[in-house]
Every structure is written in C-alpha cells, then in structure tokens.
Image (cartoon, rainbow, N blue to C red):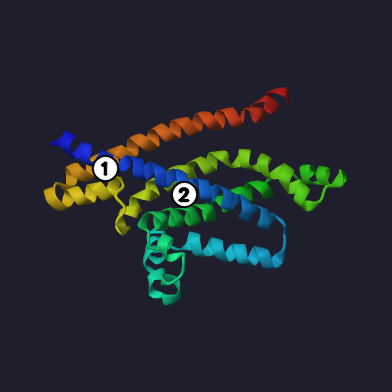
Amino acid sequence: MFQEYLSVIAQGIPTSLLLTVVSLFIAFFLALFLTFLLSMEKRWIKSAVNLYLTLFTGTPLLVQFFLIYAGPGQFEWIVKSPFWQLLSNAWFCAALALALNSAAYSTQLFHGAVKAIPKGQWEGCVALGLSRVQTLKILIPYALKRALPSYSNEIILVFKGTALASTITIMDIMGYARQLYGTEYDALTIYGIAGGIYLVITGVATLLLRKLENKVLSFERLDIKKA
C-alpha cells in the first residue's frame, strides 16, 4: 500500500519542481529590476514599488492564488481580451502568483543588501565620476552575493509554497495527495508521504545551496584571512 501511494503522489514531483524553477526565474529578474528602481532614490517610483511590496508581503499567498486565478474572470473585458487564454490557465496563474510573491520578498532582501554596502564603496564610485546607474550596475552584483544566504531560504520557501497550487486544480505533489485521499481516506499515510517528499527535496536543495554559498562567498573568507 505504501509503495502504491508513493508511486501516485510522486507523479506530482515534476510539476512542483517546474513551478518552482519558472517562478524563481521570473521572480529573480523582477526583483532585480525593482531593487534597481528602489536604489535610484526617486520618490514616486519608491512609493509605487513599496505599495507592491506591501500588497504581496502583507497578504497570504493562498489569497493571492485565489485572486489571480478566480478574480480576472469577473471582468468581461479581460475574458474577451487575448490575455484570457493565459489567465484562465491554472498553471500560469500558479506560476504568476508564486513569482509575484517571491519577487516582493526577494526585492526586500536584495535592497537590504544594497543598503548594507559600505559607504566607502559608494564614495569610491562617486570619486570615479560614475553616475547613479553606473554605480548600481557595479554594486548590485556585489550585494547579491551578500544576499545569497537569505535568498537560499526564499528558494526553499517557494518550493514549499507550490503545495498551495493544488487548491486551484494543479496536479502537483499535494494535488495527487489530495486526489488519493479522496478515494482512500488514509490521511496519515498519504499526507505523511507527501510531507516526506517535500522534506527530502528541501533537504537536498538546502545542501546544494549551502555548497553554492560557500563557493560564492569564499572571497570574504580570503579577505578575512589576509586581514
């Protein structure tokens, strides 16, 4: 029975992983763009970006799933538009919700890392006659390296967040688990297997991300040794 349950639930692993990768890809570049805008220190731009951050970090991800999936259908002009083919697709809505949510949290991480850059580095760029845009192109990659440990946690959270995609008919790990429970009613075994799959994948991902962090942040350890 255990093996049968596992074989059914494991069918959702590719969907969960693909949702994670696509969402993180979109979220990363959106977060970079928003971090750049925030760092430009333009008041009206900062206000608009901060409103977006407040909306997506201040409301539950589950609510965002429902609003993005079910909300657009209430507007006739959206239903008749070319975008309806995408907005009526549950997979697209799930990826969009995860991406927008992750981008909000990632922007906070990246912008915090930018603000933590030593003042001397900013002054050095000014002394070289670099503009604000040129300075950010140099310093943001440096800040991203510093933000990697925190961003690793965000990657794990996005993967675990895919479990909510089953609420809008996506057949991911939890989607197959819910379907199986609907016929077998063995909650402890079925959801225990689903939880175990998430645990194994997050464990492997965490180990890989820690190795990546050690490699990327090795320059700091070299600086400390030289000091």
Judged from the image, the secondary structure of the residue bearing numbered disc 2 is helix
Residue 156 drawn above or below residue 209: below
Residue at x-position 38% and y-position 54%: 91
Q: Could you say where residue 4 lies in the image, as x and y percent from the top left?
A: 16, 37
Which one is in front, 216 or 17? 17
Q: Could you say where residue 133 lies in the image, as x and y percent from the top left?
A: 76, 51
Residue at x-position 24% and y-position 47%: 176
Residue at x-position 23% and y-position 47%: 177
The single residue placed furthest to the top in the displayed view is 226
- Name the mark on residue 194: 1
Residue 198 seen by the camera = yes
Total tally of numbered discs in the picture:
2
**Which of marks 2 and 1 precedes in the sequence?**
2
Q: Quadrant of residue 45?
A: bottom right
- Name the mark on residue 32: none
Tell me the residue that label 2 is attached to. 23
Judged from the image, the secondary structure of the residue bearing numbered disc 1 is helix
Q: Could you say where residue 213 lies in the image, as x and y percent from the top left?
A: 55, 32
The residue under label 1 is which amino acid type? Ala
Q: Quadrant of residue 168?
A: bottom left
**In this view, the mark in front (1 or 2):** 2
Tell me how far mark 1 sits from mark 2, CA to CA. Answer: 21 Å
The residue under label 2 is which amino acid type? Ser
Residue at x-position 72% and y-position 23%: 226
Q: Could you say where residue 175 lies in the image, as x and y percent from the top left?
A: 27, 50
